[in-house]
Amino acid sequence: MRNRYLLGIDLLVLVLSPLLALLLRTESLGYFAAYSGPLVIYVVSTVVLKSFVFFKSGLYTQYWPYASVQELETLLRSTAFSFLGVILLFFALLVPTGLAPMGFPRSLPLIDGLLTLLFVGGIRLSIRLVYSFYSTADEGKDLSLC
């Protein structure tokens, strides 16, 4: 596995994304205490599902400093499949079984999916931009004066 650091960062993002999504949806920290059990179940199940989809789609085999349109397609495809999987998990398993009780925000998977795309894509874009910045800065040095 080429990107073990990205895997660690992604796991952190995948844990924090649903928490931020709930905070954005409810605009209150009080819901964390009220929905702590269902939130933990949601976070654990979505982290497992998303990381499985990301791993199987080859997201961690890409070399992001040289990312191109093909890597962007892989990123979009993997986040879209993980989003569809979370929607299916949420509405076909968690809601009917009562693991996501009445009053638990039904928009949480949508906000979580958008935040996941934003954070996972933003991290990889920043890697590409930093590498591009430093590689062009090295090319601009005038070595003839040394």
Image (cartoon, rainbow, N blue to C red):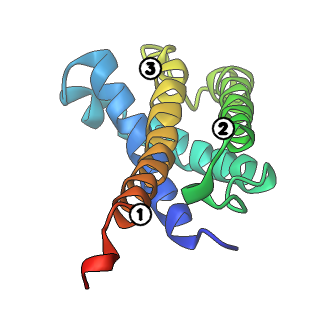
Compared across the picture, whether 105 is left or right of 80 comes to: left
- Which amino acid, by three-letter code, is at mark 3? Phe
Compared across the picture, whether 42 is left or right of 135 comes to: right
Q: CA distance from mark 3 to mark 1?
A: 54 Å
Please tell me which of labels 3 and 1 falls first in the chain.
Answer: 3
Number of marks in picture: 3
Query: Dot 1: what SS?
Result: helix
Please tell me which of labels 3 and 2 falls first in the chain.
Answer: 2
Please tell me which of labels 2 and 1 falls first in the chain.
Answer: 2
- Which amino acid, by three-letter code, is at mark 2? Leu
Residue 104's tag is 3
- Report x, y in % for residue 101: 50, 22
Q: Looking at the image, which is closer to me, 14 or 46?
A: 14
Query: Dot 3: what SS?
Result: loop
What residue is shown with label 2?
Answer: 72
Residue at 60% in and 42% down:
46
Which numbered disc, 2 or 1, marks the residue closer to the eye?
1
Which quadrant, please, contains the C terminus? bottom left
Residue at 50% in and 25% down:
114
- Report x, y in % for residue 25: 33, 17
Residue at 52% in and 62% down:
6
What residue is shown with label 1?
Answer: 139
**Residue that extends furthest to the front in the rendered view of this protein:** 144
Q: For residue 17, what is the image quadrant?
A: top left
